[in-house]
Amino acid sequence: MGLFNRDRCEGKTPEQLAGMRTAGLLVARTLELLSAEVRPGMTTLELDTMAETHIRDHGGVPNFQLVPGYRHTLCTSVNEEIVHGVPGARVLREGDLLSIDCGAQVGTWNGDAAVSLLVGGPDAGRPEDVALVEDTKESLWCGIAALRVGNSLYAVGAAVEDSLTASGQRRGREYGIVEDYVGHGIGTSMHMDPQVPNYRVSGKGPKVLEGTTICIEPMVVLGDQDNIVLDDEWTVVTRDGSRAAHWEHSVAATSTGLCVLTALDGGQARLHELGASYSPIDAA
């Protein structure tokens, strides 16, 4: 979804960050609602309708609909679908691995986040899928905790990769990190520069500035990370049919710490556990 300039981070003022927190909270609450409502027998389009209604009823605009050629509020990716799954008539079944990617614009500012879950709950899923969801989420938080003003942005991807390597070794498997799709900057548009890789990259990389806001979003598969795009020109699937998980948060970095803009608590609990500084941002 667009081209990026790898070399530049964009800082934001406290007032601008407050607007970002407003949009992020709307995304967080929408995903909380959807996660609670997912059940076997419903369609991905039902989830999409629910999300659009909630975002518009709370003063936002579904920013995925602002992407040329895309008319839905969510991307709903099931099982071997990695990202950009298009909502429709597909009926969710118990044990399906579902990733829900959601974005909203409130006023000038944007939020973007994704969760992965097992339809019917963890007990309904295959053990390897449950582990994939947990380990991808953990890698996201490790990437978030590595973000620091003044440091290289590439520290994020290195931390994501190290987390997944350690998790895989602990479980006796090797996860595939999808390299063709990465995180991105966010602000007055949902997709902005710079690119945010989910894996170790050589070179210095962009320097994180005061007020930098980015989306970190590891996409991880049980098999090979090689992928193809389906005929709908959106849905990305694993070529070998292995299952995929996707987690994402919008994050702000300041000299006093981090705020996870799309987490209801701003990320305070997990950042504390990981030894990272938390700096709250109040919504506008």
Image: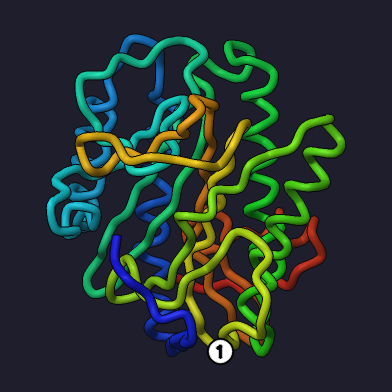
Query: 48 or 96: nearer the eye?
Result: 96
Outermost residue on the right side: it is: 170
Quadrant where the N terminus lies?
bottom left
What's the colour scheme? rainbow
Residue drawn at x 44%, y 38% as measured from the top left: 82
Quadrant housing residue 210: bottom right
Q: Say above or below: 98 vs 164.
A: above
Residue drawn at x 86%, y 36% as measured from the top left: 170
Quadrant where the C terminus lies?
bottom left
In screen coordinates, is 74 left or right of 158? left
Q: Say above or below: 251 vs 169.
A: below
Residue drawn at x 47%, y 34% as measured from the top left: 238
> Mark 1 sits on what residue?
210
Mark 1 closeness class: few <14, some 14–19, many ≥20 residues within 10 Å: many
In screen coordinates, is 242 left or right of 49? right
Q: Say above or below: 191 vs 193.
A: above
Tell me residue 123's x, y (percent).
Answer: 63, 13
Quadrant housing residue 275: bottom right
In screen coordinates, is 281 left or right of 103? right
Quadrant housing residue 153: bottom right
Tell me residue 278's x, y (percent).
Answer: 68, 70
Query: 7 or 284: nearer the eye?
Result: 7
Q: Which amino acid does label 1 sit on?
A: Glu
Q: Say above or below: 228 vs 7.
A: above
Residue drawn at x 76%, y 51% as measured from the top left: 163
Tell me residue 190's x, y (percent).
Answer: 31, 66
> Secondary structure beneath disc 1?
loop
